[in-house]
Amino acid sequence: MNELGVLLDLPSVRLAILALLLGSLSLPVVGVFIVGLDIMPVRFAMMHVALLGIALGFLTGLDPLLCALVLCAVTGGALTPMARSSAGLSGAMGLLMTLAIAAALMLLSVSGVNANGAFELLWGSILATRPFDVAALAVLAGVVPVLYWLRRRDLALLLHDRELALCSGVAVDRLTLILLVIISLAIASAIRLTGALLVDALTLLPALAARRVGGSLAAMIRWSLVFGLAFNVGGFFLALLFDLPPGPTLVLVGGVVTLLIHAVPTYRKGSPQSCASSSASPLSPSSH
């Protein structure tokens, strides 16, 4: 415990904890959006686009995270027309991922980034968190909850069924654009904490656990925040205590707990009333 106290006095550790706390206020909610919109492939595409943005930053000398944020935001906005097509977003994601990672590897090679630098991009380096990284997460921590609170009815309709939202007068295209841009920015912001390959620990795992225990959008949002905080902070402290790599530890903690939650029978679904409400839940994947 004395060693833990010494570690907690380090500025880098304190900055990492602050980043995780701020991330826990927004990234799990973004995971709820991803699950509700049923756009799992988009997060993979944005990981690769973020890597391309970071590679551009290395090549041009600009801040890598800033480049990743800008490129992800532009790409997320450009994906909006595909969301209303019959093929949905999934069809173009494979091509986008392939092109983005190929371009990223090319730029990393041209910019002279060594293998260790590229490996760090994939797996993250939470103890190398910078004030700018924290600032980006702080902005998300303010924007995402406010967006949910102001548009919670429209979000519930959109995440449940796109056509129903349209018939109810929801500005579906504009709201989808906002969500895709926020999702893209959130994934880019989380790259520093866990790396491109493990970003699901901060976004998707809390949302998947919350969907198991939450019977409505509001409940799922609340539970995702609880799980996100527990996974992130709990995993980080375990990493400090046992001298483990933080990124994989966060993923393993979140993954194991999510599996355990899904393994426990949910008696809420056993009653007729629960079954009816479950089938009409606004958390079922939207038809995109």
Image (cartoon, rainbow, N blue to C red):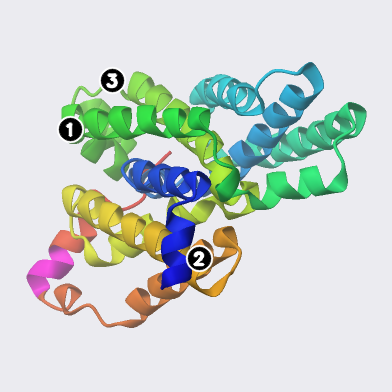
Q: Position of residue 133 (x, y in %)?
A: 51, 33
Span colored in magenta: 272-276
Q: Amino acid at mark 2?
A: Leu
**Most foreground residue, 85 or 154:** 154
User: Label 2 belongs to which residue?
Assistant: 240
Q: Position of residue 195 (x, y in %)?
A: 62, 48
Q: Position of residue 192 (x, y in %)?
A: 58, 42
Residue at (86, 47) in percent of width and height = 115
The answer to which image quadrant residue 179 occupies is top left
Residue at (51, 21) in percent of width and height = 77
Calculate the distance from the C-alpha at mark 3 to the C-alpha at mark 1.
Answer: 16 Å
User: Label 3 belongs to which residue?
Assistant: 171
Mostly what secondary structure, the magenta segment?
Answer: helix
User: Label 1 belongs to which residue?
Assistant: 149
Residue 2 visible to the viewer: yes
Where the N terminus falls, by quadrant?
Answer: bottom left
In the image, is 78 to the left or to the right of 38?
Answer: right
Residue at (91, 28) in percent of width and height = 110
Q: Amino acid at mark 1?
A: Trp
Residue at (70, 44) in percent of width and height = 121
Number of numbered discs visible in the structure rendering: 3
Q: Earlier in the sequence, mark 3 or mark 1?
A: 1
The answer to which image quadrant residue 263 occupies is bottom left
* Disc 1 packing (10 Å; few <14; some 14–19; many ≥20): few
Q: Any magenta on residue 275?
A: yes
Q: Is the residue 65 above or below the residue 206 in the image? A: above
